[in-house]
Image (spheres, grey):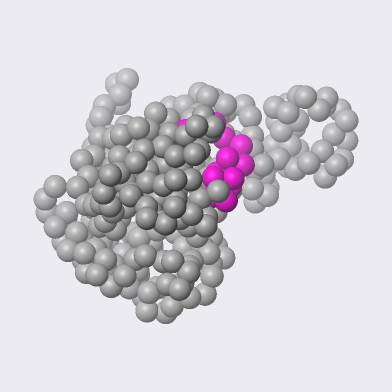
Amino acid sequence: MYPQPHTFRQAPEPDEVEDMDAFPPEDQGERLDWLFRTLGEGMCRQLGIYRVPEQLVLSVVIPVYNERNTIHEILRQVRAVPINKQIILVDDCSKDGTRDILKGMMETETDLTIVFHEKNQGKGAALRTGFQHARGQIVIVQDADLEYDPSQYPQLLQPIVEGKADVVFGSRFIGESHRVLHFWHSMANRMLTLLSNFFTDLNLTDMEVCYKVFRREVIQGITLKSDRFGFEPEVTAKVARFQVPPLEGRPARRCRIYEIPVSYNGRDYSEGKKIGIKDGFQALYCIVRYAFAD
C-alpha cells in the first residue's frame, strides 16, 4: 500500500475559488486539502482533481519509431503532468531523423532515459527494453504519436494509488471523446477484444488500447516475447493469470484489473498510422497462443 496521499493535482487556479486568501500561495497542499473538504471527493473527481502521493514515481515508457513530427510535443505533454516521473524513450531504429533528435536530447535533457535499438524490432520489443529500465512504483505505456492525452494520467493511476488494482487498462469505448475514423478498424478492435476475453475470462472493452498501467512488480514479473503489436494480447493474457506474490502476511492472489475511459485522437494511415491487417492476424495468433502457453 502506498503512503497516505497528501497532495493533489490539477487544482483550479486561485482566482477560480472564493476565499482562497485564507491560505498563503506557497501552501499548495493545505489549499488543496481545503478543496476536498469543501467540494467533497465525488465533486473533485468530476472536476478532474485526484489524489496523488508525493512519494509516487511514475515510469512512462514511450516506444518511438519515425516520430520526428510529434516527439517534441509528446514530451511537452508528458512533462506537463504534475506527477514525479521517469521518462523512458526507446527508439526502435527510426529512419526519419527521430534518432538524431533523441541523440541531441541526450546531451541536454537530463530528465530523460533514452535507449536505442540497432535494428527495428517492433513495439513489443521496444516496450520490453523500456520496462527493464523502469524504476517507478507504477509503469504506464505512452505512444509517441499524440493519439492519447497524458493529462489523463492522474485518473488512470487512481485504482492503483487507492489499493484497488494492480493493472489498469484504458478504454476508448466507454464514454470519453474520440476522433471518428474507420468503422472496420473499430470493429476489428472489438472482435479481437471479444476473442481475448473468451480465453482470459476478463470483461475488457478495449484490449488493444495503448494506455496500460501496471504496478512495476507485475510488469517486471512477466516474461514478454512478442516483438510487434502482439504485445497487447500477450500482456493481457499474462496479467489475467499473473499471481501477485504474498506480502506482509497477504496471500498470493490474481491481478486485480480495472478499466478507465480515455479520450482518443486517432491518426489516419495518411497521417502515419502503422498498424495494419497483418498485425490483426498476428493478434489473433497471439490471443490463441498465449491463452495456453507462455
Q: Residue at x 26, y 49 (%)?
A: 119
Position of residue 231 measured from the top left corner of the image (x, y, whole percent): 27, 53
State how many labels appear: 0
Residue 78 sits in quarter: top right
Give whichever of 286, 246 is nearer the camera. Answer: 286
Residue 285 painted magenta: no
Position of residue 61 measured from the top left corner of the image (x, y, whole percent): 41, 42
Q: Is residue 277 left or right of residue 21?
A: left
Can residue 159 be seen by looking at this rendering? no
Residue 76 sits in quarter: top right
Residue 86 painted magenta: yes
Q: Residue at x 44, y 45 (%)?
A: 100
Q: Which stretch did the figure color magenta?
A: 73-88
Give whichever of 225, 250 is nearer the camera. Answer: 225
Q: Is residue 41 left or right of residue 152?
A: right
Q: Residue at x 65, y 51 (%)?
A: 46
Residue lying at the far left of the rendered structure: 293
| Vertical side of 245 occupied by 42: above or below | below
Can residue 31 be seen by looking at this rendering? yes
Position of residue 92 measured from the top left corner of the image (x, y, whole percent): 33, 49
Q: Is residue 193 left or right of residue 34?
A: left
| Vertical side of 270 occupied by 223: above or below | above
Residue 5 sits in quarter: top right
Residue lying at the far top of the rendered structure: 248
Q: Quadrant of the N terminus?
A: top left
Q: Residue at x 70, y 30 (%)?
A: 33
Position of residue 84 measured from the top left corner of the image (x, y, whole percent): 54, 31
Q: Is residue 207 left or right of residue 243?
A: right
